[in-house]
Amino acid sequence: MKGKVKELRIEDWDRLKFNDDRQNVIAENFDDLKNALLSYLEGKEQEGLSGARLPFLSVEVV
């Protein structure tokens, strides 16, 4: 996840204007960010850190 955030250059929040730069980058890359986050959470689940199935992983974002 950190790698994806760094790749999109949105890790340095202070340098980006909130209403313009950050929101545009996130909107333009939403699917990639969503998939990276879901993969990260699924990996944590498989490591046994969650203890139970995370119910929101099966929710589809439209």
Image: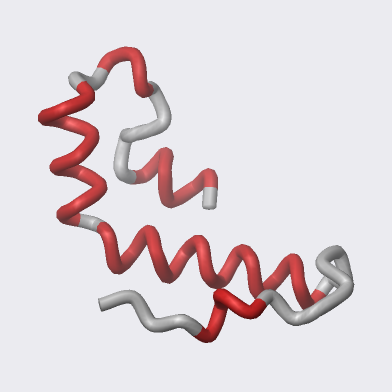
Q: Is residue 47 above or below residue 55?
A: above
Quadrant hosting residue 23:
top left
Residue 40 rendering spot, x and y as whole percentages: 61, 64
Q: Residue at x 38, y 22 (%)?
A: 12
Report the number of discs: 0
Task: Tell me which corner region of the image, top left, top right, bottom left or bottom right, holds residue 53.
Answer: bottom right
Left or right: 11 in relation to 1 = left
Q: Residue at x 34, y 14 (%)?
A: 14
x, y percentage for residue 39?
A: 56, 71
Q: In the rendered view, would you say 58 is above or below 27? A: below
Quadrant location, the C terminus: bottom left
Foreground residue among 14 and 7: 14
Q: Residue at x 32, y 35 (%)?
A: 9
Query: Which residue is at the far top?
Result: 14
Left or right, residue 15 beside residue 3: left
User: Which scheme is used to colour this image of the protein?
Assistant: secondary structure
State left or right for residue 1 relative to residue 51. Answer: left
Q: Left of 19 or right of it: where is 35?
A: right
The percent position of residue 35, horizontal first and vertical second, equals: 42, 70
Measuring 79% from the left and 77% from the top, which residue is drawn there? 46
Q: Nearer the viewer, residue 5 or 49?
A: 49
Between residues 19 and 12, which one lies in front from this camera angle? 19
Displayed quadrant of residue 17: top left
